[in-house]
Amino acid sequence: MRARNYLFWVALGFSAISAAVVLCELLFAFANLGVLDAWRGQLIALDIAFLVLSVLQFVFFRVRLTLHALFFLRLVLFMAATYPLAASSSVRTVLLSALVFEAAIYLPVATGMSLAGIAILFSLFWSLSPQSGAGSVQVSFERALATLFYPMLVTALGALLTRLQKLASERENLNVQLRTAGSRLVETNIKLLDQIAKGEEQTRRLERDRISRELHDTIGYTLMNIIAVLKASVELSKKDAEKTREFLFQGIDQAQKGLTETRQALREMRSAVDDQASIVKTINRLAEAFKETHIRVTAHFSNIPWVFGERVDSIIYRVVQEGITNAIRHGNATEIAIHLARDAGRVLVTINDNGCGAVAIAEGIGLTGIRERLREVRGDMSAENIRGGFRLFARIPVGSDT
């Protein structure tokens, strides 16, 4: 369904002004038209009907068949109104200009130009009709020029405005498509980062499990060997002292090897723990993902430790992720600022954007899920319009030892 654009208002205004000009001339300068007084009332009625049909075109612009019928009826009224005005070019030119201007705006190019051509040719025919008095050929030629030049100029203006409006509409549609595609790309990027984070966490978990198994196997195997050597040494101590010493040295060697392997496993485990993704690093990576886009995301941290713990870090990440997604998807934001601060046993998460905000804040699945996560840890969340954009704010309790 087509939407009424501003050019229809321009056409209606032009038609109203034209009808008003013609009405003033019929009321106050009728004697100069060279028309019998008997035509005055009929011409005024035709002028008003001309304007009424223009209003109906404005109202029923979506119904193509009705619109064509109204233009055809206006063409008939124009012919009827200009028939007795063979000696006057002003009224004819004004009515003709209004008709062809609206035809160029309302109708498709081919139809509008055809209707405008018919109206101009008809008006030109009357302008060139023989006139009484000296110099009638000269006068008719001048009238023909006025009748031909101004309506064609107005027709060209209407076609140009229509073309410019179409180009502007296509550009706006393209911008909307680009914004939509950009938003989808950003959301895909965020989801990809989320999958990468999950993959890294799973890799760390698998590495910890592998090291734990190796540590278990190393300690178990070493202790079993030492126990076996010690038991054999106890038995041999009564019979062969030299053999006992040899077994004890084997036990010492086994214990030394076990200690070395245990320390190595513990170092690997410590390295895996130290390599745990920091919430600071994760948020920074999320912000840097927009570096090559038209969206500017900045992250600010105040009194934030390297990690809060797996559960709290996960909630913080989800809050920030949802805040960015909503700012881009619903607010068309181009600047997003993330603030993380710790205060009185809580971590405060704030996401400000410069988007269009929301007339009525309705929580979707994403925000509802975040609120449920926060409720599990006795946290809370608020969302509100701010001057120049929108804000998402969350308070998350954290342990005193974090």
Image (cartoon, rainbow, N blue to C red):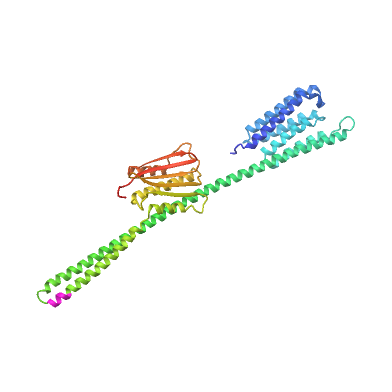
Q: Is residue 263 left or right of residue 157?
A: left
Residue at image coords 65%, 33%? 57
Q: In this view, does 200 lie to the left or right of 10?
A: left
Asked if residue 131 is among those painted magenta in the image, a careful observer would answer: no
Residue 153 against residue 260 in the figure, above or below: above
The span picked out in magenta is 241-246
Q: Residue 62 in the image: state x and y as whole percent.
A: 62, 36
Q: Residue furthest left?
A: 238
- Residue 89, by quadrant, is top right
Residue at 52 percent of width and 50 percent of height: 294
Residue 384 or 210: which is nearer the viewer?
384
Quarter of the image for the N terminus: give it: top right
Residue visible at 12% across and 71% down? 234
Q: Position of 135 compared to 37: left or right? A: right
Q: Residue furthest front?
A: 303
Would you say the magenta stretch is mainly helix, strand or loop?
helix
Residue 392: give x, y in percent of width and height. Answer: 43, 42
Pinpoint residue 135: horizontal percent, then vertical percent: 89, 33
* Image quadrant in which you'd find residue 262: bottom left
Front position in the image: 35 or 27:
27
Residue 79 percent location from the top left of the image:
76, 31
Q: Quadrant of residue 101?
A: top right
Q: Which residue lies furthest to the right in this view?
A: 134
**Which of the two residues, 147 or 371, is positioned nearer the viewer here?**
371
